[in-house]
Amino acid sequence: MALEKFDLTGKTALITGAAGLLGIEHAAALLESGANVVLTDVSENSLKTSRNTLANNFDQSKIIEHVMDVSQLNEIYSVAKQLWSESIRIDILVNNAAIDPKVKDEEGILESSRLENFTLAEWDIQLSVGLTGAFLCSQVFGAAMAKDGKGGVILNIASDLSVLSPDQRLYQKPNFPDDMQPVKPVTYSVIKAGLVGLTRYLATYWADKNVRSNALSPGGVFNDQGDDFVHRLTSLIPLGRMADRDEYRSAIQFLCSNASTYLNGQNIVMDGGRSVW
Ligand SMILES: NC(=O)c1ccc[n+]([C@@H]2O[C@H](COP(=O)([O-])OP(=O)(O)OC[C@H]3O[C@@H](n4cnc5c(N)ncnc54)[C@H](O)[C@@H]3O)[C@@H](O)[C@H]2O)c1
């Protein structure tokens, strides 16, 4: 039966940044397919809220949560050791955590995103989560998948901006001089392109151990952004709209299950066609 290949019963998936907008959707997707999920995030309160939300719709015995900062190797190890001590094997790792500071209209904030003003400290913080965090989690959980011979799946959540340069006109504010216009920061492009490189590296590194690695590159998710922004962005998207937050679920199910056993090292760009226009 074709659908049996999507069945994740008996598998356990760990999701980083699971308390965010999409993290909870990834968790729901995996639960829908029968997996157990380990929700991890740096934010303890949001993690509890996400767990409770998911427990309304799914068997709560299949959901556990751990506070885990992906930029801290000791925290990742301590969660891993805790899981292993309970005989919980991570079969699927979804590297989803990121810091994506939203453009705010506060004095000094707008222009701080600009390349000329972007601080090394901010660069380091964002890379430590979005890129180094994915490396560290893959190092710990991917190595364990490879070591016991059972294999597994690593899925890196990138972005359509892994293959496109940001169109900075999307973020323009009226009546601001050029040197104060906000932009999508350089870190976003570097992290997302870096995740695709990490994906390809891992895809070959543990291929003989049956650990597959792919990237999913979502386009922008509608989340009550302002009308101007939505209008500008959707005019760049052939389907003429942003994504609904649950629209990536079926891709997650495909990429993390036996439905995609021959897919390895790829970056699946799911952007309503934006990158082909
Ligand atoms: N939302 C979109 O439109 C969109 C589009 C393309 C790609 N993405 C990507 O999808 C992923 C999820 O995006 P989102 O919209 O849910 O973002 P979000 O900001 O809602 O969630 C990110 C989560 O990461 C967590 N986090 C931050 N620092 C962390 C750390 N050090 N350790 C562990 N967790 C940490 C945050 O607490 C938050 O819960 C990100 O990688 C993002 O770049 C999102």
Image: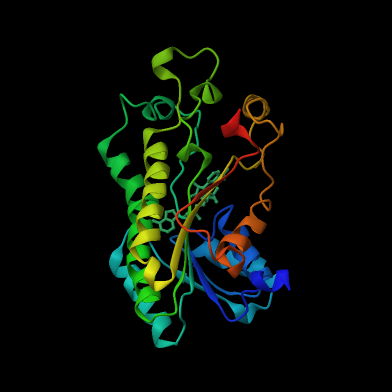
Q: Percent x, y for residue 239?
A: 71, 34
Position of residue 161 in the picture relative to residue 220 (left or right): left
Q: Residue at x 35, y 69 (%)?
A: 76
Residue 111 figure quarter: top left
Of the pair 190 and 38, the residue shown nearer to us: 190
Q: Quadrant of the C terminus?
A: top right
Position of residue 171 in the picture relative to residue 200 (left or right): right
Q: Residue at x 45, y 20 (%)?
A: 181
Q: Quadrant of the N terminus?
A: bottom right
Of the pair 44 and 75, the residue shown nearer to us: 75
Position of residue 92 in the picture relative to residue 251 (left or right): left
Q: Percent x, y for residue 161?
A: 48, 37
Residue 186, above or below 178:
below
Q: Percent x, y for residue 240?
A: 71, 31
Q: Residue at x 58, y 68 (%)?
A: 257
Most extreme residue toward the left, as rendered? 120
